[in-house]
Amino acid sequence: MTEHAKYEESRAVGEQAREKDWALPSFAKQLFLGDFRLDLVHPAPALPDEATKRGEEFVRAVRRYLDAHVDPALIERTGQVPDEVVKGLAGLGAFGITIGEEYGGLGLPYLYYCRALMLVGSYCPALATLLSAHQSIGVPQPLKLFGTEEQKRQFLPRCAAGEISAFLLTEPDVGSDPARLATTAVRDGDDYVLDGVKLWTTNGVVADLLVVMARTGKKISAFVVEADSPGITVKRRNSFMGLRGIENGVTEFSQVRVPAKNLIGREGDGLRIALTTLNTGRLSLPATCAGNAKWALKIAREWGNARVQWGHKIGRHEAVATKIAFIAATAYALEAVMELTSRLADDKRNDIRIEAALGKLYATELSYQALDELVQIRGGRGYETAESLAARGERGVPAEQMLRDSRINRIFEGSSEIMRLMITREAVDAHLSAAGELINPEASRQERTQALKRASRFYAKWLPTLVAGTGNLPTAYADFGPLAAHLRFVERTSRKLARSTFYGMSRWQGRLEHKQSFLGRIIDIGAELFAMTAACVKAEEDAKDLGRRPYELADTFCHQARRRVDALFERLWDNSDAHDARLAGYVLEGRYGFVEEGILDPSIEGPWIGAPEGGENVRRKIL
């Protein structure tokens, strides 16, 4: 099969799994179309008083438990979350936060699930990963969305009580390309028989229940699998740059029998189940990232006041002050993005697939930058471990650990590059519906003719709406006070963004999908506009209790975001993308091998893609 044929096959598999209908409105979808629907997010949906009360009580209980019983330095040092910590959190209901009360869970809104993860993530990111992998992508979420009543009653109470679950999709030769999935599930009477190897199974080493994606014929299906089933072997526990306490492994399936009743949905629904699960499952990452950024702000403020150089506190030196301002504004905005997206998820009146993806992409990128700036502000102490700092008599601030721990967030649940491509597909859905065959190089002449008619009708109505709008009115959004100008900017820029997308389609037509750098900048601009909107909405609400202070944070954040937006627009058309792609091709061909001379490679010899052979089963049970 040629590379082009393989690409088309992979694209077809992904396209078949997409949710193609938009039954509910989407703020972000309209934003990319140049239609700034502020009414969809303002005022942000409110929660019932009873749910708010229970949520606040739960977060306070988690805070007390963390403070009294969890030692994050011990987890970092030993690389393991103590069993008693897992059991203690299970006793609080932390493994069933969003599972309904009828199934033994707390039944709390997503907002409080995210606030709990924000708290845990600020204190011990590995512990937050354990909780989120279990609930966001493990057994609870897909069963809530697609499970039968029998499956829910069989498995959800176990999950809520603290039996840990894991999600198994990735394989040694399969990342974001599901067409290459090799694990198989063959029907045999009342069972399916599973064979294959799964990689990077977060929670997989200690899991009691697994969600496993396997190929049933030519399609992909999802199963709930008991982790202690005969034929399942955890081949090893992986070690990483950060998150040293996570139980992540390589899991092998050899003739594993799974009852047919454990099939989630129907045969062939697996990839759709995985993608739909992630629509809300991705909310956990903006939550932990917001916690990281808020912690970075606390340390930056305290250190900026404590450290004196050249007669001034370092926080008063402009070079450091700009970094502190970036961290503060980013922390406020990331919390705003997390809160708005989770409240939209709770409200259930909006389709949040793009909002959740934007939140994941934006929060993981910006929080990493904030932590990197914190390490820079701390200087040598930022690079030194907390244990070393404490051993020589200073406060043990784990800045380098937090930076290491957060790095995976840009890869977890879809790398930033894959997220941009995925969001692009959703954001330009209206264009593809109207003119897809027109820009499809494989389309026939008849298909192109029909597409031209559809496109003409669509663009005749749509393009005139991009000329002028509310953002051109000096008095628009006056209710937002000093932030009104920023919302006018968002409205104007959303129309400019839509025009730029149209220009890109006109210029490259069927080649547009391969202009990944261009499309990535389009998505990054949309993410900035979404974050600006969220920050303004949050500030307008917070100001009722906190006065001008939220406005100051949101205003500074919006000024920073506008500079980033301007730079992204400039790079849409003035960039080195073509030169870079050509040079990369030469690099891959070995043209510049001479540049690699004069070095030694410390890598351990072995195949680029492989699987462990032999060895004992390292799966362990939480006792």
Image (spheres, grey):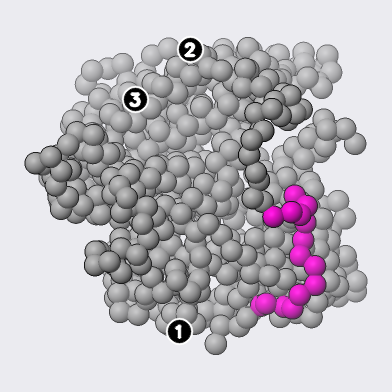
The magenta region covers 604-619
Q: Secondary structure at mark 2?
A: helix
Residue at figure coordinates x 21%, y 52% from the top left: 303
Q: Mark 1: which amino acid?
A: Glu
- Classify 37 as above or below 267: above
Residue at figure coordinates x 81%, y 60% from the top left: 183
Q: Position of residue 204 (x, y in %)?
A: 63, 70
Q: Which residue is mark 3?
A: 563
Say which label, 2 or 3, has the lower sequence index: 2
Residue at the far left: name it: 311
Alpha carbon distance from label 2 to label 1: 63 Å
- Which corner quadrant of the image does residue 587 belong to? top right
Q: Secondary structure at mark 3?
A: helix
Residue at figure coordinates x 59%, y 20% from the top left: 577
Alpha carbon distance from label 2 to label 3: 27 Å
Q: Position of residue 113 (x, y in %)?
A: 41, 63
Q: Secondary structure at mark 1?
A: helix
Q: Which residue is mark 2?
A: 464
**Does the rendering let one see residue 272?**
no
Instruction: Find out whether residue 609 is within the magenta segment.
Output: yes
Labelled disc at residue 84 = 1
Q: Mark 3: which amino acid?
A: Arg
The mark closer to the camera, 2 or 3, is 3
Q: Is residue 425 left or right of residue 536?
A: right
Q: Residues within 10 Å of mark 2 (few under 14, many from 20)?
A: few
Residue at figure coordinates x 17%, y 36% from the top left: 317
Say which label, 3 or 1, has the lower sequence index: 1
Alpha carbon distance from label 3 to label 1: 48 Å
Q: Residues within 10 Å of mark 1 (few under 14, many from 20)?
A: few
Q: Is residue 16 left or right of residue 468?
A: right
**Does the rendering let one see residue 315?**
yes
- Classify 130 as above or below 221: below
